Image (spheres, helix red, strand yellow):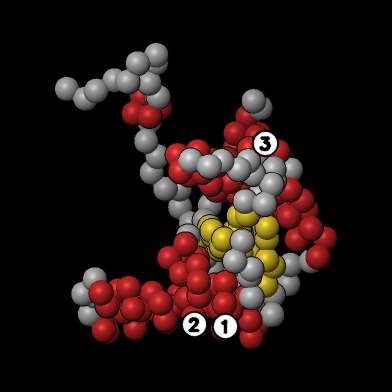
Amino acid sequence: MSLNLLNVFRNRRSVKEYLPKEVSKEVLFRILEAGRWAPSAHNAQPWRFIVIQDSATKQRLAKAMASRWNEDMGKNGVPKEQRESLIKASVERFENAPIIIIACSTMENMDEYLDDRRKKNEYVMAVQSVAAAIENMLLAAHGEGIGSCWFCAPLFCQDVVRKVLKIPQYVDPQALITLGYPAEKPKSPPRKSLEEIVHQNLWRHKT
């Protein structure tokens, strides 16, 4: 692997603040095209992407997800003032992102089994495939000078996202990706060493 490619991985950041600058259709197309060429289980390509640029739709989605989040935080005993602060920041973050992409999975072309064990494994394989496509898009965005951030919020309110965006029942919202020209330069987050995460032949237990 070339050093230039390794630097792409090292320098990509999760960007949450964006400039009020439009991302061209050509750039967006290339980012989506990168996702299309990701590897997938059985080459089923179980990803589906919903691109949202309309301000009203972004606002409806952000507020609907925030409402569910507020309920969940309330169940966890998070104080009202803290919830309101977190929700306000979340709604503004999604409303202000020039582009939102909802990454979804579908089992349409995945293998079908009768037993629960293999059904579950097929579903996990579909989700893993979608994750690979998302990573392709994040790296492609970085290469285009576009900031991006991967949020898992739709997982916690799939029914809400499905209702707002009129997503059919056989398609599952998995993630939300924001895109735009970066208005911040996040620092490099800490990473575990290779010694901590790589195991040769057998699992090494801590002593």
Indicate which label's residue lies in the foreground, 3 or 1.
3
Whether residue 144 is visible here, answered yes or no, is no
Instruction: Identify the residue shown where x is 69% and y is 67%.
Output: 51
Quadrant, the C terminus: top left
Quadrant, the N terminus: top right
The spot of residue 202 in percent (x, y) is 35, 16
The residue labelled by disc 1 is 59
The label shown at residue 42 is: 3
Number of marks drawn = 3
Instruction: Identify the residue shown where x is 70% and y is 38%.
Output: 43
Question: How far apart in space, not on screen, are marks 3 and 1 (Cα)?
Answer: 37 Å
**Kind of residue at disc 3:** His
The spot of residue 118 in percent (x, y) is 50, 38
Whether residue 120 is visible here, answered yes or no, is yes
**Kind of residue at disc 1:** Gln
The label shown at residue 174 is: none
Instruction: Identify the residue shown where x is 24% and y is 71%.
Output: 76
